[in-house]
Image: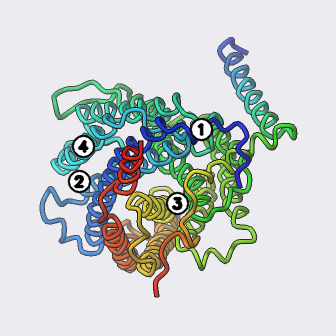
Amino acid sequence: MTPRALAYLLFTLLLAGVFAGIIAYYFNRKRHDRVEAPKYRMLDDDDPLPDSTGGRREG
Amino acid sequence: MGNGSGNMYTADNTAQEEMRMANGARSDYIVRGFVLSSVFWLLVGLVLGLWLAAEMVFPALNLAPWLAFGRLRVVHTNGLIYGFTLAGIFACSFYMLEKLTRTALAFPGLAKAQLWLFNIAVALAALSLFAGMNTSKEYSELEWPLDIVVVVLWVMFAVNVMGTLVKRREKQMYVSLWFLIATVVTVAVVYILNNLAIPLSLTKSYSAYAGVNDANVQWWFGHNAVASVFTFPILAMFYYFLPKSTGLPIYSHRLSIIAFWSLVFGYLWTGAHHLMLTPVPEWIQTVALAFSLFLIAPSWASVINGFYTMNGNWEKMKSNYLVKFFILGITFYGLQTIQGPTQAIRALSGFLHYTEYIPGHVHMGTMGWVTMVITASMYFMMAKISGREIHSVKLANVHFWLILVGQLLFTVTLWIAGIVQGAMWKATNPDGSLMYTFLDSVAALYPYWTVRLLGGLLYFAGVAVFAYNLSMTSRSKPGTKWSAAAAARSQAA
C-alpha cells in the first residue's frame, strides 16, 4: 500500500469515526432532553396562526 | 410547549427588544423583497419552460436564435435555480435566522443591497444566456464576470448568516440553522471550484480543468448544487415551517441532526453517478454509486421525521392548507431520493441516462418538493409579515391541486417516455442491427411531449393563482404592525 493510499484509508476511517461519534453523542440517553429542547423552543417565539388552519378560513 | 432550559432570551430587556423590533421591521422589507423577486422569477422561468415544452411538440416555435431551444433551456434552468429558488432561500433564511436566533439580522443594510444586486445579476444572467454567452457546463453556464458577481452575492449572504449566528441569543441551534450553515459553505466551495476558468475575453473563458477531470469536477459541482440549493435549505424550511404552521414540534430533533450530518458526509461523494459508464475511472463511479445508495437513509430520516410529526394529527391535512404542501413536498422528496440513487445503479443508468426519464426525475424534485415547500413557506411568511391572514385559503387549495396534478402529469409522462425511449434505443433485431432509428424514437415521443405540455400548463395555472393570492396578501405595508408597536413603546417611555 502506498503512503498516499494509506493516507486516504486513514482519512476515511477518521471520517467514519467522527460520524460514529456524532451519532453516539446525539443518541446518548443522558443528553436526550437537552438535544430535543430546541424543537420545543422554536415554537415559543411566534405561535402558529390563531385557528391552526395556517391561515384564514373562508365562508 | 417549551421547557425554556438553556434559553438565553431575556424578554424583559426593553432596549434590546425595541432594537429587535426596529431591525425586524427592516428585515421584513428584505424578506418581502426576496419573496416578490422569487415569485417574479418563478413566473418568468415557467413561461420559458412552457415555451420549451411547446417547442418539443411544435418545433417551428424555434423562431429566432434567442428563442432557440438551446438558449431558452439554460435561461429556464438558471432562472428557476438562481432566480426563483435562491431568492426563496434568501427570503426564508433571513426570516428563520431572526426567529431561531432571537436576534435581529446582523447587517440589514447589506441584505438590502444584496436584494438589489441579486435581481440585477439574475437579469444580466438571463440576457447573457439569451445572447448565447455560455460556458457549456450544466447549471454553471454563466461567464466569468457574472460568476464573480454571484460570488460577491454569496459572500454578502454568508456574512449576514454567520454574523447573525455569532451574535445569536439562542445558544442551542435548531436543525434548520445547521442546514443553513451547510448551504452557505457548500455552495461557496462547489461554485467557486467548478467555475475556475481562464478568461479569453469579457464574454468567453475556458475551464481551468481538462477532459475527464473537467467532467468530474463539473458533476461534483452539479450534484452538490442539487444538495446545496434543492436539499439543505429546503429541508431547513421544512423543519421550520411545518412545526410553525401546525404548532407541533418535530418528532425527533436528534434524528434530524443525524440526518443532517449523514447528508453532509455522504453528498459530496456522489457527483460521479452522473458519469456512469463514461471514461471517468471506474472506482470513482463505484464510490459515487455506493454513497448514492447510502443517501437513501438520511433522506428518509427526514421523511419519517415529517410523517411522525403529524402522527395523531393527520386531520390537519384537511383543516390546515399549509400542511398539505409540506407533507406532499416531503413525500416527493422521499420518492425523489429513492429514484435518484436507483438511477445511479449501472444497469439502470445504462438504460435510462440521456432519456426523458431524467428530466422527469428532476422535475418531481423541483415542481414537487422544492416549489411546494417554498410556496407554502411564502404563504406563512407573508401572512406574518403583513400582519394579516392569507387572502384566500380557497385559492391556496386551488393552487395546491393544480400544481399537484400538473406535476404528476408532467413527471409520470416523462418517466414513461424515458422508458419507451431507452427501450427503442436498445432494441435489436436477431442479426444484431438496431430495430429503430433515432428518428423513430423521436416520433414515438410526440404524444408524451404533448401530455407534458398539458401538465406544464396546469402547473403554471396553479402558480399564477399562487402569485395572485400572495400579492393580495402582501398589500399591507411591511412592518406596519411592528413599527406601530415600537412607536407605542417609545411614546410610553
Which comes before the other along the chain, label 2 or label 3? 2
Chain of the residue on which disc 1 is drawn:
B
Q: From the image, tell me which residue sits under label 2.
A: B71
Answer yes or no: are tags 3 and 4 on the same subunit.
yes
Q: Please name whichever residue, A4 or B197, is drawn nearer the observer in this view of the structure.
A: B197
> What residue lies at 36% left-to-right and 79% top-to-bottom?
B454
> What residue lies at 46% left-to-right and 29% top-to-bottom?
B163
Chain of the residue on which disc 3 is drawn:
B
Q: From the image, tell me which residue sits under label 1.
A: B10
* CA distance for labels 2 and 3: 25 Å
Residue B325 seen anywhere in this rendered image of the structure: yes
Say what amino acid the circle numbered 3 marks: Leu
Say what amino acid the circle numbered 1 marks: Thr
Q: Please name whichever residue, B372 or B426, is drawn nearer the observer in this view of the structure.
A: B372
Q: Which label was assigned to residue B116?
A: 4
Which comes before the other along the chain, label 2 or label 1? 1
Q: Residue B248 location, x and y as percent?
A: 67, 61
Task: Name which quarter of the figure residue A30 lies in.
Answer: top right
Task: Name which quarter of the figure residue A16 lies in.
Answer: top right
Chain of the residue on which disc 2 is drawn:
B
Q: From the image, tell me which residue sits under label 3.
A: B352
Query: Are there few (<14), some (14-19), or many (20+) residues within 10 Å of tag 1?
Result: few
Answer yes or no: are tags 4 and 2 on the same subunit.
yes
